[in-house]
Image (spheres, helix red, strand yellow):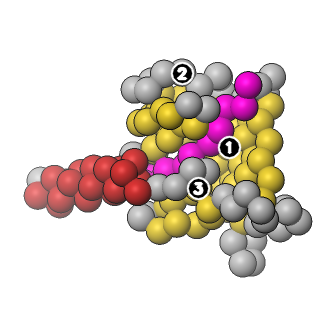
Amino acid sequence: MLPLAVSCIGANKMQEEFVETSPEECLVIDGKTIFTFEPDKCQESYSPERNEFRIGDDSMSNYYAFKAESALGATGSTVMGDLSWTTDVDVRYKLGMEYKIVKSKGELRWLWCRRTRTGLVVRVIE
């Protein structure tokens, strides 16, 4: 029973750190920042018809993409979705995961998947 409690505390702390310290548009997995949007070197796109977000460098050789099953709701709501991102050697996926919208600020949404300890920030461009 104790390992589960410790695991929950660790996941909660990671979520809190993600919400409090993550910059605009980034991908964080297990507390490590995998990708950060830099306006002068990156691009972003959002398709409201497909509920799809893509953030990447100008060559799109480094990116993360999130496809939600439905439109993102208000803070506290959840959405199922598929995440993909690049590494130095391949493309990784986390498919069919539940993400909670843990923070909203203007067009930005902070999404957190407790199961995979993954956070991402996307911009709902209107």
**Label 3 is placed on what type of residue?**
Cys
Instruction: Name the quadrant of the C terminus.
Output: top right
Q: Position of residue 95 (x, y in %)?
A: 62, 45
Residue 122 is inside the magenta segment: yes
First in residue order: circle 1 vs circle 3: 3
First in residue order: circle 2 vs circle 1: 1
- Whole-Å distance between the Cαs marked 2 and 3? 19 Å
Whether pointer 2 and pointer 1 mark residues with C-beta atoms closer than 8 Å, the reply is: no
- Whole-Å distance between the Cαs marked 2 and 1? 15 Å
Where is 19 relative to 90, above or below?
above
| Of labels 1 and 3, the one closer to you | 3
Residue sitting at x 52%, y 55%: 23
First in residue order: circle 2 vs circle 3: 3
With 98 as the anchor, is 52 left or right in this view? right
Residue sitting at x 46%, y 44%: 113
Q: Would you say residue 122 is visible in this rendering?
A: yes
Provide the residue span drawn in magenta. Answer: 115-126
With 9 as the anchor, is 100 left or right in this view? right
Where is 27 relative to 44, above or below?
below
Q: Position of residue 28 (x, y in %)?
A: 51, 59
How dense is the environment of label 1, judged by Cα within 10 Å: few (below 14), some, or many (20 and up)?
A: many
**Residue at which label 2 appears:** 73
Element carrying mark 3: strand
Element carrying mark 2: loop
Residue 121 is inside the magenta segment: yes
**Of 43 and 3, the residue lying toward us:** 43
Residue sitting at x 80%, y 31%: 47
**Label 2 is placed on what type of residue?**
Gly
**Residue at which label 3 appears:** 26
Residue sitting at x 61%, y 32%: 107
